[in-house]
Image (spheres, rainbow, N blue to C red):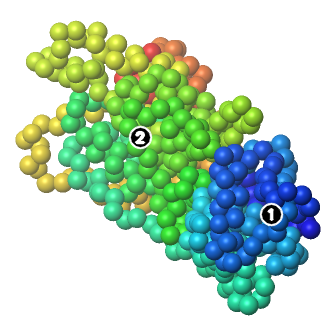
Amino acid sequence: MTALAYTVAFDGIDARLVQVQCAITPGLPAFAIVGLPDKAVSEARERVRAALAALAIALPSARISINLSPADILKEGSHFDLPIALAVLGAIDILPKDDIAATVALGELSLNGALVPVTGALPAAVAAGSEDRALMCPQPCGAEAAWVDSVRVLAPATLSQAIDHFTGRRVLDPAEAGEVTQHSGARCLSEVKGQERAKRALEIAAAGRHHLMMVGTPGSGKSMLAARLPGLLPPLTPVEALETSMIHSVAGLLTEGGINRTRPFREPHHTASTPAIVGGGRGAKPGEISLAHNGVLFMDEFPEFPRQVLETLRQPIETGEVVVARANAHVRYPCRFMLVAAANPCKCGYLPDPARACGRAPVCGDDYLGRISGPLMDRFDLRVEVPPVAYTDLDLPATGETSQVIAQRIAGARRIQTDRYAAESAMWSNADAQGDVLEAVATPDDAGRALLRDVAERFGLSARGYHRVLRVARTIADLESSNDVGRAHIAEAVSFRLTLTKEV
């Protein structure tokens, strides 16, 4: 007696189809699972046995063999419980084998037969749709998986309901997609007193997805400025929302099946480990840089992060993806994020104030910011000093433009970039522009070219720094809806490039 069921194994945010083969043969009673299962998958036999017993279904006194094919791929997670149970039920002729084989199933079984929600329902639905199969998953996962229009999603709450569906006693209705949510609790940028230059840098960074470094004394408003970024960024496009939600689905962060249109804003603590930031650990889960995909990664107290963690950011910043290397596989996650870093000027934080700085000034400042390597610092498009605000200014009313006004200007600049790079496969914003495309869209006029040449010769701009100045200048021009990059745009871009150090 044999039967087939189908499920998936996750490779990053990609779901690979796995065939669950069940064979019942004469021999001593046994329940074996082969095909490179991990501990959670091997324990499925006990959960399946108990769940079937709770439904008064007795397993035959024979050898039950489960093979997870292809056998050379590591199978991880408890979501193999449901497909294994369906394969067993098909092998003992309780369920129709053809219907089981036409369905991709995933879900964890409790001992009483209830289905427990699992991670990865959204990418599993994408894989099922590409194979022209239905998807069966636990009821709490149904609203999440139903966002994929090309697949029919069945979401039973228990194994008994799944059996009733396949036998025709009570057919399940297709699950409906969850609600689209968009948080609107972002604080207004006009509430920040002073810091007009830092506000301008924040606007440029948001408009072109440029990386931003802020350096200032404790309490000057660096974290306050960064916290207002979500109110400036445009909502995720449908494609971006689906891609971001697939990462969050694998990480188990989607709630109630809803897809969020607000761009992610992640702010890990400076004690975070390398796997927490770049991904890895058990199951090679996505790290903070991938969870910030299409959004913002804010790293406060930037020099306090371990040097190894900071250096691992260099390649993902350039490529927009991270590879988690494991002994038997390499897992890829997208990580196209905007890095916003904040740092004190020195260990004590009061280097600019002679009355409060420590006795090692100014050497302490060089030592502290020296924890950030030159190649990593070179990747920040915008660098801005955030000076302390006088206490007399704190009593003044809010000034400057509101986040809503600035967000409209940023949205306009983003639309210009979307149209500009529509024909490019790996470019979505000015921060992604490179090569001939960058030269074509960001070539300055004669006055701007002369200024950039003088700056490059005087301050020794690296090739990367040269191109990053062009990208920022292009964004500044987009904010003004200007087709041409002029001298003023180059001058402002250069001013943010040379703010913290002349060693560029």
Q: Is residue 464 visible?
A: yes
Q: In this view, does 162 lie above or below 186?
A: below
**Label 2: element kind:** loop
- Graded by Cα atoms within 10 Å as few (under 14), some (14 to 19) or many (20 or more), the crowding at tag 1 reads many
- Residue at (61%, 30%) from the top-left corner? 315
Q: Position of residue 352 (x, y in %)?
A: 21, 21
- Graded by Cα atoms within 10 Å as few (under 14), some (14 to 19) or many (20 or more), the crowding at tag 2 reads some
User: In screen coordinates, is 351 left or right of 296?
Assistant: left
The residue carrying mark 2 is 268
Q: Where is residue 22 in the image (x, y as percent from the top left)?
A: 85, 62
Please give the label number shown on residue 374. none
The residue carrying mark 1 is 6
User: In screen coordinates, is 229 left or right of 254?
Assistant: left
Q: In this view, does 406 lie above or below 73?
A: below
N-terminal-most mark, 1 or 2? 1
Q: In this view, does 399 lie above or below 171?
A: above
Identity, as a three-letter code, of the amino acid under mark 2: Pro
Q: Position of residue 258 (x, y in %)?
A: 52, 69
User: In screen coordinates, is 32 left or right of 300?
Assistant: right
Occupied quadrant, residue 27: bottom right
Q: From this viewpoint, which residue is outermost toward the bottom?
A: 169
Q: Is residue 210 visible?
A: no
